[in-house]
Image (spheres, grey):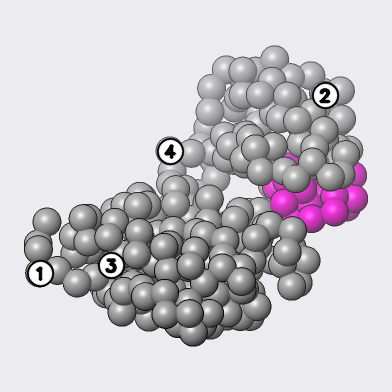
Amino acid sequence: MDQGFEPKIVAFLCNWCSYAGADLAGSLHYTYPPNLCAVRVPCSGRVEPEFIVQALLSGADGVLVSGCHPGDCHYGTGNYYANRRFNLLTRFLEVIGISKERVKLEWVSGAEGLRFSQVAKSFTEKIKNLGPISIKTPTRIDWATLSRTIAVVGSAGKLFWDENKCMVEMVDFFLDYTQKNSCGECVPCRIGSKRMQEIVKKISNGSVSEEEISILNELSEVIGASSKCDLGKMAGKAVKFTLQYCKDDIDAHRNGGCGYSVPANPGWKAIVLK
């Protein structure tokens, strides 16, 4: 660790809670490192994954996202969206060579000036121990093209895949993610996604029947239309898309293999400017 290293940290702070908490910390003389560059946002749910990646690729050594405690969001569910996006983002960061330890999501209310001070100090110290960021990935990215070329999953999450993945495998992965992150409030998402995954796994091992394919199609339509949040809706839509446009992948699995018939997402070839 470079003892003289002072990290640059971008902090996206919710206007209603975390930014107020930072302001209170200053008012009560709870000090925190000057390394943080605060960016006030309407809600933590407004922080797109692209904002965080762009900050890191632009020279920030770490990024802190902070919002209202779950259940206290000024907009109802914004912080739940932020949490889902963050979980996906940490997986994506390692793909492009950035340690997930460089990003942090914390809940801080407007009355928690001391907590904000502690979070800021702790995260700054962590980034100091990690040292300056080193990224081999090209830094000039066309974000407009990015939003058109990558797949949307969950609540505005983004997912890349290459030619070694097929849609059956990707849907299985997404349904697993949906169940782990479901709030459990509505039956379509909580139970329906589990029933869909059971059939998708039968497709994977080649034991699915035509009747089960028909049931899967019906489940995808019902779940996509009746789930209360975007996570459940996208689970249904992802399965529906696969059944409609990726039949070659399904047939290949039913015949004992995988055809990898879905072309690789344009990914970095399209969004990274050489």
Query: Magenta span covers which residues?
Result: 221-241
Instruction: Say above or below: 263 vs 61.
Output: above
Amino acid beneath label 1: Gly
For marks 1 and 2, give the CA distance. Answer: 62 Å
Q: Is residue 169 visible?
A: yes
Question: Horizontal placement of 133 versus 111: left or right?
Answer: left
Q: Residues within 10 Å of mark 4 (few under 14, many from 20)?
A: few
Instruction: Say above or below: 208 vs 21.
Output: above
Q: Nearer the viewer, mark 1 or mark 3?
A: 1
Callout 2 secondary element: helix
Residue located 74% across and 73% down the image: 74
Q: Position of residue 239 (x, y in %)?
A: 73, 42
Q: Quadrant of the N terminus?
A: bottom left
Q: Which residue is mark 1?
A: 4
Q: Nearer the viewer, mark 1 or mark 4?
A: 1
Q: Which residue is mark 3?
A: 61
Q: Is residue 118 magenta-colored? A: no
N-terminal label among 3 and 2:
3
Q: Position of residue 128 (x, y in %)?
A: 22, 61
N-terminal label among 1 and 3:
1
C-beta proximity under 8 Å, tags 1 and 3 = no
**Label drawn at residue 212:** 2
Q: Nearer the viewer, mark 3 or mark 2?
A: 3
C-beta proximity under 8 Å, tags 4 and 2 = no
Amino acid beneath label 3: Asp
Callout 1 secondary element: loop
